Amino acid sequence: MAAGDDVAGLVAQAREGRPRAVARLISLVESESPRLREVSAALSPHVGHAHVVGLTGSPGVGKSTTTAALVSALRQRGQRVGVLAVDPTSPFSGGALLGDRIRMSDHATDAGVYIRSMASRGHLGGLSWATPQALRVLDAAGCDVILLETVGVGQSEVEIAGLADTTLVLLAPGMGDGVQAAKAGILEIGDVFVVNKADRDGAASTRRELRSVLGMAQRPEGAWRPPIVMTVASTGEGLDVLVEHVDAHREHLGAGELQRRRHDRIRREIRAITLETVRRRVGDLSGHAGLDDLAAQVLAGSTDPFAAADQLLEQL
């Protein structure tokens, strides 16, 4: 960020819907700029309005096509939409490898849509460490709905439930997704299940298998019962029904449950920031003056490694 740039000014421009300001703020977040704390503080008064919808599922089920189709459906209702598509990391540039902005080119010129590809940067949960702050940028920029699409990495897909208000789990016929869903714990995090590519053989069988497994789940009285939606995202078939179920889930959450989910989300984020800060400080301990002394004491038997670690933490 150039010395003359003003974080407050960028946030003000982002709230006016200026895409360059949104892009620069997300870039500051992704690069872990020294001004990241300033950005976070400036965003905080303006967040908490957007409905965050997560899309997850194994590679090949049509997440990006479904995301693009959802953008079209939401824009028809006049809603402003943000898209964060977390892609695999390029081994050469460290950037997003697949580039969903290219795959969603139909929306590239729509001023009511902001699309950003983010690299997972090796994060095993399929999401970037910077994702929560990037969501805040889009929320503050006035997005009504933010679609968060994961990279899709098998059993780590469940992490998206910690960031989304509503989680869509996509499956496709002929990919063994019913069995995989049970293994990965996806049944526990899905608010709406989508059998995409429903025009293919085996779609009805996938739905029956999924319905059978969901039927065995024990849910408290009055709890949300995840629906199963059949879609062909490439043609838009079933998207109107999917949007209706997303709306119904948002209404079911109400103010109380939605606040609880968001409270838990922020707790996890604060914890992650704290742990990352400690990790970085510990990473700088190789030249710490007291480390050699403590190692010598453990070697001499005058203390133990746990007690030594406690002493070292007190010196951080």
Image (cartoon, rainbow, N blue to C red):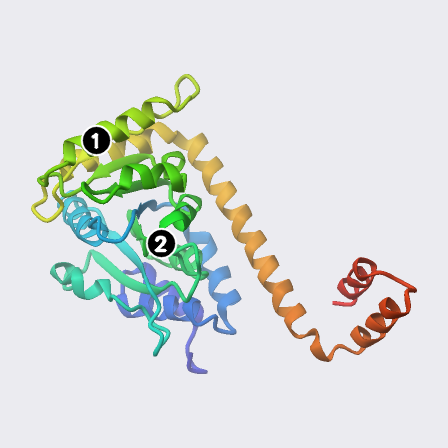
**Residue 96 is drawn in which quadrant?**
bottom left
Residue drawn at (14%, 49%) of the image: 72
Q: Is residue 75 left or right of residue 40?
A: left
Q: Which amino acid does label 2 sit on?
A: Val
Q: Where is residue 265 in the image (x, y as percent from the top left)?
A: 48, 45
Image quadrant containing the N terminus? bottom left
Query: In this rendering, is residue 208 above or below 277?
Result: above
Q: Is residue 167 visible?
A: no
Q: Is mark 1 on a helix, strand or loop?
A: helix
Q: Which amino acid does label 1 sit on?
A: Arg
286, 19: nearer the viewer: 286
Query: In this rendering, is residue 197 above or below 3?
Result: above
Report the residue marked by disc 2: 153
View extreme (top): residue:
221
Q: Do the residues labelled 1 and 2 touch (CB within 8 Å)?
A: no
Q: Is mark 2 on a helix, strand or loop?
A: loop
Q: Where is residue 172 in the image (x, y as percent from the top left)?
A: 20, 42
